[in-house]
């Protein structure tokens, strides 16, 4: 049975949270990031099992095609694609969301998945695995994050539809809809009171936030041959929040 460590070529698009933790798991490295930070640039390429680094900028049109060509030049073949780029705001209700904010959030959370997947597919063959990052918000509905929850619902639909298309080519497509996880993106959205001060620790039945490492293992599973009978599915590491769908 093929493990993630034995699956050699991966492309991970994302931020500084779950994707950086996934990088530390056996056989998975982060290769792409829209806005690389100094920490990432300093450490990437020095860790055991590190991979070439490709800042990708805005993934759309010709830029996405060029990114795909650059990746193919390095890897020739891509076995795993993890779409993990995301942004969110505490936006209030629908009347508080501007058209510009709505469009920007969808460009990052949905359009980038479409463009990068389309650019990578020519380099991915039978046995490939695509993993998209959704969110528990898309299942439970969060009025204060209407735009974010809607965009992540689109990711779930994208995952199911793409799976039905690519499964004929032997490529699996799944998603991970994590619950609240203490990532840099979440940390930047709260003040110095910390997670307890905002009640975030009580937002799951387990009474705490998840850690990136607790979610990263689901990506490793979906990337490995151990999940070879799964496609079009969404996994829910969310601290016990019951969802339907």
Image (cartoon, rainbow, N blue to C red):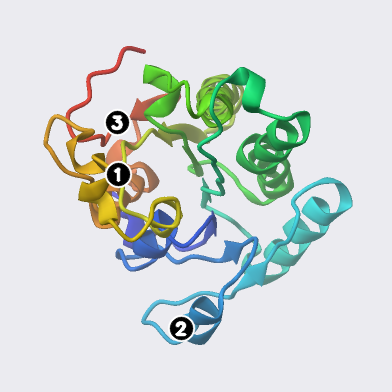
Dot 2, crowdedness within 10 Å: few (<14), some or many (≥20)?
few
User: Which of the labelled discs sits on residue 27, or is there none?
Assistant: none
Q: Which residue is mark 3?
A: 236
Foreground of the two, 220 or 35:
35
Q: CA distance from mark 1 to mark 3?
A: 9 Å
Q: Are marks 1 and 3 in contact (CB under 8 Å)?
A: no
Foreground of the two, 51 or 181:
181
Q: Position of residue 126 (x, y in %)?
A: 54, 41
Q: Is residue 230 visible?
A: no
Q: Is residue 24 left or right of residue 240?
A: right
Of the numbered discs 2 and 3, the one sitting upstream in the chain is 2
Tell me the residue at 52%/21% (across/down): 160
Q: Position of residue 148 (x, y in %)?
A: 54, 32
The number of numbered badges drawn on the structure is 3
Q: Is residue 35 visible?
A: yes
Tell me the residue at 45%/77% (across/down): 50
Say what secondary structure mark 2 lies in. Answer: helix
Q: Position of residue 191 (x, y in %)?
A: 38, 56
User: Which of the labelled discs sits on residue 218, or is there none?
Assistant: 1
Residue 222, quarter of picture: top left
Q: Is residue 159 left or right of residue 24?
A: right
Of the numbered discs 2 and 1, the one sitting upstream in the chain is 2
User: Which of the labelled discs sits on residue 43, or is there none?
Assistant: 2
């Amino acid at each position: 049975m093929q493990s993630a460590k034995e699956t050699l070529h991966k492309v991970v698009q994302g931020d500084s949270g779950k994707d950086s933790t996934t990088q530390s798991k056996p056989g998975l490295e982060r290769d792409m990031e829209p806005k690389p930070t100094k920490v990432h640039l300093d450490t990437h390429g020095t860790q055991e099992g590190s991979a070439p680094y490709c800042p990708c900028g805005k993934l759309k049109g010709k830029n996405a095609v060029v990114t795909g060509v650059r990746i193919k030049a390095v890897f020739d073949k891509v076995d795993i694609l993890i779409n993990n780029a995301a942004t969110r705001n505490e936006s209030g209700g629908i009347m508080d969301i501007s058209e510009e904010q709505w469009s920007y959030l969808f460009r990052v959370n949905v359009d980038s998945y479409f463009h990068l997947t389309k650019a990578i597919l020519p380099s991915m063959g039978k046995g490939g695995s695509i993993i998209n990052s959704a969110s528990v918000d898309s299942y439970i509905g969060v009025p204060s994050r209407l735009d974010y929850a809607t965009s992540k619902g689109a990711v779930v639909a994208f995952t199911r539809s793409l799976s039905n298309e690519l499964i004929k080519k032997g490529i699996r497509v799944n998603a991970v809809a994590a619950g609240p996880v203490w990532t840099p993106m979440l940390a930047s959205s709260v003040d110095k009171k910390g997670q307890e001060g905002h009640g975030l620790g009580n937002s799951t039945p387990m009474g705490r936030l998840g850690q990136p490492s607790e979610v990263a293992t689901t990506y490793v599973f979906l990337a490995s041959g151990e999940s070879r009978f799964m496609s079009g599915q969404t996994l829910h590491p969310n601290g016990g929040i019951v969802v339907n769908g």
